[in-house]
Image (cartoon, rainbow, N blue to C red):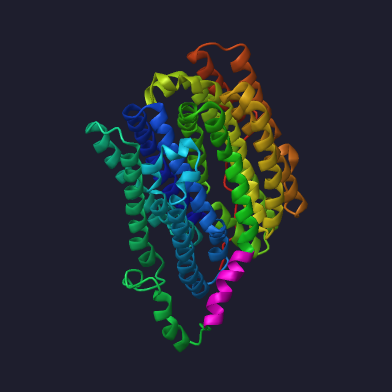
Amino acid sequence: MKQRGLSGSVYSAGAVIYATVALLAVGKLLTNALSPEAVGQVALVLLAGELLGLLGGLGLPAALPKLLAAADPDGQRTTLHRLFRFQGTLALLIALGCVALLFLRSWWPATLQGMMPVLLLLPLLVIVVTLRDFLLAATAGCHAYKRRAQTIVVSASLQVAFFAVLYFLGIESPFLFVGAYVVAAVGGLGAALGLFPRTLGLCDETAFPTGWFFVRKNHRRDTHHGASSTYATERELPLSALRFAAPLYVNNLMNFIFQRVDTLLIVAWLGLGSAAIYEMVKRLPNLLSRLLRAALVPYLPSLSELLRDKESAQAGKLIQQTILFAAFAGYAVTLLLIALEEALLTTLFNADYLEGTAALGPLLIATCLAVQAGVMGQALIALDRPKVVMVINFGLAATSLLLNLLLVPRFGLVGAGWSAVAAAGFSLLMQRLAVSRAGIPLPFQSGVLIHVLFAAAVIINHTVASGMMARMGGAVGFVALCLALGAVKLETPRQEPTS
């Protein structure tokens, strides 16, 4: 299991590093091809696609790694086949709902009416995003990390290629840029559909292409082997999965409010131009989050297996080491990016986006706290306590929404950034307490020093250090002190071999 977890981390981190570089290239192309207002249109449509894809997922992408990792091979096959068909049907229904809403555009606000051509792509975007997220979650649950990485690389490469063509042709249409994103996502989905079945050996190579309801073709084959494949069972599996995923679904919606409602409020109060600046600046914290989460992809399946085998002590060590890794790596990168913020925003986008420097530091800090909270949340999922995560994330969403309503109108982008910090800190504290109360040993003192050192570095940056070189020195000093004082120990906890 240790070797598999290491391999999974390497593949996942490698793919996301590649996708990160691609995303930076895409941001540069987009902001240099379009005005901030047009970039705001693209960002708003992609945000809507993300939200509707989340609604269509019903929490299944969050639950699937746990469901598949806890099942035997035959159970994995049954779960994957039936839930894939169920997920696709939901995505199609939501896309049809989007089409229906297009006929009610006379009721829309003026801002949305001006975006009508771009919104025509939303139904297709919803289908692609929903199925892509499902398949990527399934590969993680079955430890198919290499194929997962290939799918991410294909999608990222296509997006860069399409955006580059539009940029060099001098295209200034938000519709075509959103269309290029959709086509790239379709390419990634095609890669997942083509590679995924062969990886797991769950079905023959022609099973996915032969039709949407290929599960029914396998019905007689499963019955031959004595498996229960009645239509009642086919209905019960999605229902049981949805019952497990329901708290995770609410949890994901609450996380969406925490992560994205600030952009919607900025659109309402400051306009599409400011929202575009904020969304582009948020790409750096989002990239940091993606890198950290990519390295942690094997964490939930591995933790689920340890808890299945009743190895609570080893599970506690795995959680502690994962938290320390996320905190140390996240804080170090945050300090480095704060030191380089002006040069980064000018290089990655253009001088029009320097207004976002006020929000960049708080958003990076909030990202580090949110990733650590996510580690604790996944531990609660592995402990079969998703409802606890749901309750905590109600508080997270409420805190974020309230603070944004209070601070964004008065302080603008920086108010949104510090609202995120407060909400993420609340979530981390509550989820850590919940994991400890669930019986997993998590000594409080094990992570205090690294937070204290980071807070000191941030205060020094804002009160004493001036200039890029002084702040870079602060980042180096933070890393050196963490290692010298033993604030972080990144050795992998020993695990007994499993049969």
Q: Position of residue 239 (x, y in %)?
A: 59, 70
Which percent across, then down, holds residue 1?
52, 58
Relative to residue 405, is residue 266 drawn left or right?
left
Is 235 part of what is drawn in magenta? yes
Residue 123 x/y as whole percent: 41, 53
Residue furthest out toward the right: 437
Above or below, comparing residue 259 to residue 9 in the picture: above
* Snapshot quadrant of residue 224: bottom left
| Residue 99 visible in the snapshot | yes
Q: Residue at x 48, y 51 (%)?
A: 6
Q: Quadrant of the C terminus?
A: bottom right
Res 43 quadrant in image: top left
Camera-side residue of 107 and 55: 107
Q: Which residues are magenta?
A: 231-243
Q: Residue furthest left?
A: 169
Q: Does residue 18 sit above or below 11 in this rendering?
A: above
